[in-house]
Image: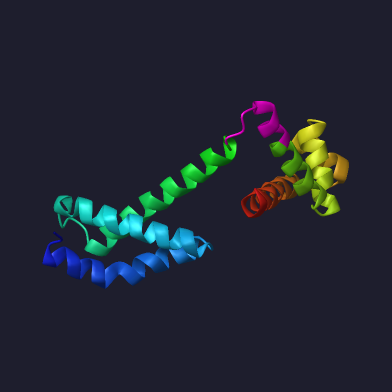
Amino acid sequence: MIDEKIGRTIEEYEERIEGFFRKKINNIEDIEDLTQDAIIAVIQSYSRFQSRSLISTWIYGICRNVLNSYFYKKTRDRKNPGFADKEEAGLLEKTLLKIAIDRLPPRFETIYDLFYVKKYSIKEIGKLLEKPEGTIKYYLYELRGRIKRYYNENG
C-alpha cells in the first residue's frame, strides 16, 4: 500500500516527470514506460529520501538514472541485436555506416575519407584543405554527430 505522503508527491510530480522524458525522447511509448519506471523507483526508494536536498532534485536524479539506463540498454541492444551470427551483425553495422556516409554533404565525406580511411592527422587534413585545425576538429565533431543521429533514427 502506498503511503499518503508518497501518493501526494507522485500526484504532484507525475506530469513533471513525464515532461522531463518528453524533452529527451520522441517515442511516446518509451516516454510512458520511462515515466512509470521513474515513478516506481521513487516509490521504492522514498524511504531513503533524507531531505538533504529538495524532493524535486531527488526525483529528477532518479529520472536521470532511469534515462541513463534506457540509453545504455538501447546502445547495448544495438551492439548485440540478437543475430545468431556476428558477421551478420557486423554487416548490418557496416551497411548502416555506408548509408550514413553516403548521405553526408561532400565536405564531410572528404573529411571522413581523409581521417578515417586514409588515416591523415588533423594537422595534415588542415594543410591539405587549407583550413585551420580548429575547423577540421569542428567538421569531425559535426560528422560524428550526423552519423550518430542517422544511427539513432534508422538503427
- Measured along the vertical axis of the image, is residue 25 above or below residue 19? above
At which x and y percent is residue 127?
84, 40
Residue range in magenta is 82-91
At which x and y percent is residue 98?
78, 42
At which x and y percent is residue 136?
75, 46
Instruction: Identify the residue at horizontal 66%, vertical 33% (top origin).
Output: 89
Residue 85 placement: quadrant? top right
Does the image show residue 112? yes
152 to the left or right of 70: right
- Measured along the vertical axis of the image, is residue 18 above or below residue 144? below
**Is residue 36 or residue 119 the one in the foreground?**
36
Q: Is residue 38 magenta?
A: no
**Is residue 95 or residue 101 the one in the foreground?**
95
Q: Is residue 89 magenta?
A: yes
User: Overall secondary structure of the magenta stretch?
Assistant: helix
Q: Quadrant of the N terminus?
A: bottom left
Instruction: Identify the residue at horizontal 54%, vertical 63% (top origin).
Output: 26
Does the image show residue 120? no
**Is residue 34 or residue 49 the one in the foreground?**
34
- Measured along the vertical axis of the image, is residue 40 above or below residue 94? below
Instruction: Identify the residue at horizontal 13%, vertical 66% (top origin).
Output: 5
91 to the left or right of 114: left
101 to the left or right of 3: right
Residue 53 placement: quadrant? bottom left
Q: How many marks?
A: 0
148 to the left or right of 98: left
**Is residue 147 or residue 52 the one in the foreground?**
147
Instruction: Identify the residue at horizontal 82%, vertical 37% (top origin).
Output: 114
Which color scheme did the rendering employ for the protein? rainbow
At which x and y percent is residue 150?
68, 52
